[in-house]
Amino acid sequence: MQNKTVNLIQIDWQGPYTLKELHLLNDDSLDYGIYQIYGKHMVYGKDALLYIGKADYQTIGKRVSQENWWDTNDSNHLKIYAGRLSGEKTPDEEQWSYEIDLAEKLLINVHKPAYNSKSLSSIPVEIQDVHILNWGDHRDLLPEVSGLRWTSKLDHLLYDTYKLNTPVK
C-alpha cells in the first residue's frame, strides 16, 4: 500500500435552521461548507436525512435558497444543518473549495441520503485519502468517516490475521 498523506477535514455542524432562517447563513466571511437537510420522506418517514449539499463560492443560505425546498416536502418541517470546515488556519479559496468538494462526495457516498441519487453512481478515486471528523450537531452523520474504509483502495491488500509465533515444545 502506498503511504500517502491523509487529507483531514474537520466539519463543525450547527443547526437546526428552518427555510425562514436561511438569512442567518449568509455571512460572506464564514458561511461556506456542507449542509444537510432533514424532512419527511414517504419511505424513510419523518425527520429523515434527505440531502447533503455543498456551498462554495456562495453562502449556505444562498445555495439552499436556490433549491426547490419550498415546493417539495413539507417545508414547514424541514431542518437544515450547516457544516463549516475548520482547522488551524483558513486555506486559500481554491483549497477551501476543493476540501468542500471532497467532503461532500465522501459524506454522500457513505450516508446515501434519499435525494442524492445522482451523486451515488460511482465513488471518486480522490476521496480515498480523505478523513472527516464531524463535530457539533452532526445529526445522523457518523462522527468519523474515512475514505479508506468506504472506497475500494484496500480491497486488494493482502493481509493475514495476527497470531503469536510461539515455539513448539
Image (cartoon, grey):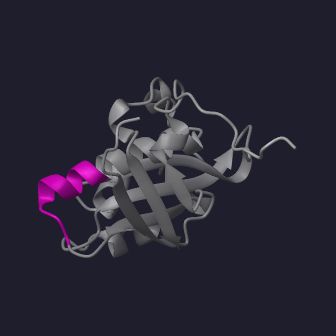
Q: Can the viewer see residue 68?
A: no
Q: Quadrant of the C terminus?
A: top right
Residue at the far front in the pictured view:
169
Task: Return the x and y of residue 37 as percentages of the image width and height.
Answer: 52, 55
Q: Is residue 27 above or below residue 9?
A: below
Q: Can the viewer see residue 45?
A: yes
Task: Return the x and y of residue 144 as percentages of the image width and height.
Answer: 54, 59
Q: Quadrant of the N terminus?
A: top left
What residue lies at 57% left-to-right and 62% top-to-bottom? 143
In this rendering, position of residue 42 left or right of residue 1: right
Q: Is residue 121 above or below residue 5?
A: above
Q: Is residue 52 magenta-colored?
A: no
What residue lies at 13% left-to-right and 53% top-to-bottom? 94
What residue lies at 50% left-to-right and 71% top-to-bottom? 135
Q: Is residue 76 above or below residue 115?
A: below
Observer-nearest residue: 95 or 7? 7
Task: Tally the marks.
Answer: 0
Task: Return the x and y of residue 154 as percentages of the image width and height.
Answer: 51, 33
Observer-nearest residue: 30 or 11? 11
In this rendering, position of residue 84 left or right of residue 81: left
Task: Return the x and y of residue 80 as percentages of the image width and height.
Answer: 50, 62
What residue lies at 33% left-to-right and 63% top-to-bottom? 61
Q: Is residue 91 magenta-colored?
A: yes
In this rendering, position of residue 165 left or right of residue 29: right
Residue bounds of the magenta highlight = 90-99
Observer-nearest residue: 28 or 33? 33
